[in-house]
Image: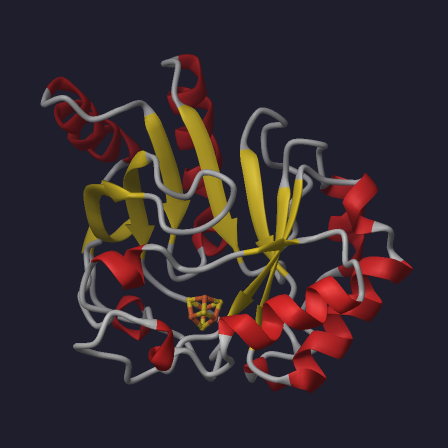
C-alpha cells in the first residue's frame, strides 16, 4: 500500500477529538476539495506492506501510544484491497479503528467494528454531489457524518441533508465544521476559518439542528500549516 506518513498526535476532529491517536495517512485522492489541507498526500509516499504498516504502528504502541488509530488520507478507500485486511488485523489486535473517508467510495465492505467518519461534501467544497447515497445504508450507529461548511449555501445544504435523511437517528454524531483557509499558517485562532465558528454556532442554535459543532482542534494547538499532527 502507498503510505504518506504514520505518526501519533491528538485527534483533532470527530467525537474522539482531544484523544491521543495514531494516524496512518495513505497516499492518493480522487477528489480535489477547494479547502483541502492534505494536498501533499496526492502523490509520493512510499510502498509498504500491511505487515510493515502494522509493525510500525506496534512500535508506536510499544513506545507508549494508545491503541486508538485512524486510517486517513488522501482517500484510504482507494486502496481498499489492502486497507480492509489491515483493518481486520488491527481490530483483532484490540485497536479502536477510525476511518476518515470522503463518502465518495463504497463503504459496504468495511468491517462493522470500524468507526467510519464520513464526509458529505457541501456545494462550495469543490466536490459537490460526490456523496454516494447508498453509503447511508452502510452506516452503523457508532459512525459519524461530517459536513465542512464554508458559507450559508453550504450550511443550508447540510441542514437540508440532515433533516431529509434524519441523520441524527442513524449515527452517533453529525458534525458541522467551519472550513479552514487553505493557506492558513501562523496564527492559531478562528480568524483562519473561512466561516466564523460563532456564525455557524448561531445558525445551528437558531435551527435547533441535531448536530455538533466541530473545530479542527489540531489547528488551534499547532500551526495550521504544520503536517504530521
Ligand atoms: S477528500 Fe480529503 S484529501 Fe481528498 S481532496 Fe477532499 S479534503 Fe483533500
In-front residue for pair 137/177: 177
Q: Residue furthest right?
A: 164
Viewer can see residue 180: yes
Q: Tell me which residue sits at (87%, 55%) in the image.
A: 165
Q: Nearer the viewer, residue 191 or 158?
A: 191
Say how many tags the image has: 0
Say left or right for 89 vs 47: right
Q: Is residue 34 left or right of residue 66?
A: right
In the figure, residue 55 lies in which quadrant? top left
Percent coordinates x, y for residue 93 in the rendering: 36, 14
Q: Is 194 situated above or below 133?
A: below
Q: Residue at x 24, y 35 (%)?
A: 53
Residue 221 to residue 160: above or below: above
Q: In screen coordinates, is 179 left or right of 154?
A: left
Residue 8 at x, y percent in the picture: 20, 40
Query: Considering depth in this image, is 196 or 157 the residue closer to the camera?
Result: 196
Visible residue check, residue 1: no
- Residue drawn at x 38%, y 23% is 90
Amino acid at each position: 500500500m502507498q503510505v504518506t506518513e504514520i505518526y501519533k498526535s491528538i485527534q483533532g476532529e470527530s467525537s474522539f477529538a482531544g484523544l491521543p491517536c495514531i494516524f496512518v495517512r495513505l497516499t492518493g485522492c480522487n477528489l480535489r476539495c477547494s479547502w483541502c489541507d492534505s494536498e501533499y498526500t496526492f502523490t509520493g509516499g512510499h510502498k509498504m506492506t500491511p505487515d510493515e504498516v502494522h509493525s510500525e504502528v506496534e512500535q508506536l504502541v510499544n513506545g507508549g501510544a494508545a491503541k486508538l488509530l485512524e486510517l486517513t488520507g488522501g482517500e484510504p478507500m482507494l486502496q481498499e484491497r489492502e486497507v480492509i485486511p489491515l483493518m481486520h488485523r488491527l481490530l483483532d489486535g484490540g485497536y479502536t479503528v477510525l476511518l476518515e473517508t470522503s463518502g465518495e467510495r463504497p463503504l459496504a465492505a468495511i468491517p462493522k467494528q470500524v468507526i467510519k467518519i464520513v464526509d458529505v461534501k457541501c456545494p462550495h467544497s469543490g466536490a459537490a454531489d460526490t456523496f454516494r447515497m447508498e453509503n447511508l445504508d452502510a452506516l452503523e450507529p457508532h459512525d459519524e457524518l461530517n459536513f465542512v461548511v464554508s458559507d450559508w449555501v453550504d450550511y443550508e445544504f447540510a441542514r437540508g441533508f440532515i433533516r431529509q435523511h434524519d441523520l441524527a437517528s442513524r449515527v452517533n454524531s453529525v458534525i458541522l465544521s467551519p472550513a479552514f483557509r487553505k493557506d492558513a499558517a501562523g496564527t492559531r485562532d478562528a480568524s483562519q476559518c473561512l466561516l466564523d465558528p460563532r456564525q455557524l454556532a448561531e445558525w445551528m442554535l437558531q435551527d435547533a439542528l441535531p448536530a455538533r459543532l466541530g473545530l479542527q482542534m489540531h489547528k488551534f494547538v499547532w500551526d495550521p500549516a504544520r503536517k504530521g499532527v
